Amino acid sequence: MPQLSTVIAQIESDPQLKVVVFDSAVPGFFLTHYDFTAPLDLTIRMAPGPTGLPPLPDMLVRLSRAPVVSIVQIRGRATGVGSELALASDMRFASREKAVLSQFEVGAGFVPGGGPMARLPRLVGRGRALEILLSGNDIPADVAERYGYVNRAVPDAELDHFVDALARRISTFDKQSIAEIKTLVNNVSLPTDSELAAEWRGFLASVQRPAAQQRIKMLLDIGLQRDPAVETNLAKYTGEVSNQVGKQ
């Protein structure tokens, strides 16, 4: 989070910047989830950001409101915080063959904290938001496009060129006009700070419950955060853990 905070501050303060593109240099992954091996107290003790919200919601809100166009280019898995960063960005473009999005948290026994309950219904509608959030299943790029989870699913061979061309086109336009259009769209589309704060409180309360701690430990024992195969098949493993817990 400190690294992301530095990036967000740079985006907000650069007077020349018009467009920023987030992608990943790690094959198979865009961005995964919260670090469950770090002590939770490290997160709880972090001071609120400039918006008054806790650090992660603060950074995502500031990204949404920045006078700069934010685009995510998803090639690989965007899970948990990865999905939440994508949802907080202005536009989302996914590799048709390689992108997978998910909010897996329900399968680990806790509530997401980075705003998907507030943002997803505004993009995909209530029923589809509940399907994504309550199933914890992987959403492939073609379904994500159909639902409105991403703007477009683009053939992988064309993704880099498509995103680059769009970003460069937008960057030729007047910065003040870009910022004003984005602000007016924000006024009718973004969730309130109170909605996002409630999600973060829900995350902190739920992730400390015994049921969540049991499931997280089981997932870590299987290889969560160590074995790429577990991260790649997180929906499968959260389902297996849930079945094991149900039989106890």
Image (tube, rainbow, N blue to C red):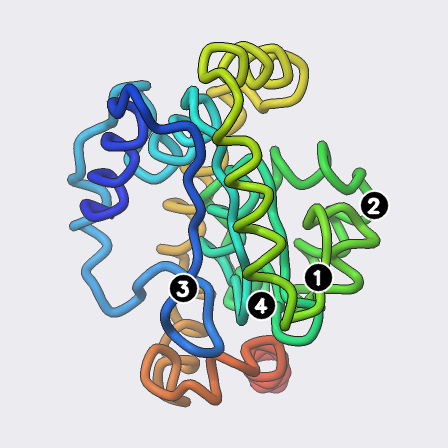
Q: State yes or no: discs 3 and 1 in contact (Cβ < 8 Å).
A: no
Q: How many marks?
A: 4
Give the spatial CA distance, label 3 vs label 4: 25 Å
Q: Residue at x 68, y 50 (%)?
A: 150
Q: Nearer the viewer, residue 81 or 155?
A: 155
Q: Nearer the viewer, residue 9 or 54?
A: 9
Q: Residues within 10 Å of mark 3 (few under 14, many from 20)?
A: some
Q: Which residue is mark 4?
A: 107
Mark 4 vs mark 1: give the one in front.
1
Choose the circle earlier in sequence order: 4 or 2: 4
Give the spatial CA distance, label 4 vs label 2: 19 Å
Q: Position of residue 244 (x, y in %)?
A: 58, 86
Amino acid type at mark 1: Val
Q: Which residue is mark 3?
A: 24
Q: Secondary structure at mark 1?
A: strand
Q: Residue at x 67, y 14 (%)?
A: 188
Q: State yes or no: discs 1 and 2 in contact (Cβ < 8 Å).
A: no
Give the spatial CA distance, label 1 vs label 2: 25 Å
Mark 3 vs mark 1: give the one in front.
1
Residue 181 falls left or right of residue 121: left
Which mark is on residue 127?
2
Q: Residues within 10 Å of mark 4 (few under 14, many from 20)?
A: many
Amino acid type at mark 2: Gly
Residue 219 falls left or right of residue 190: left
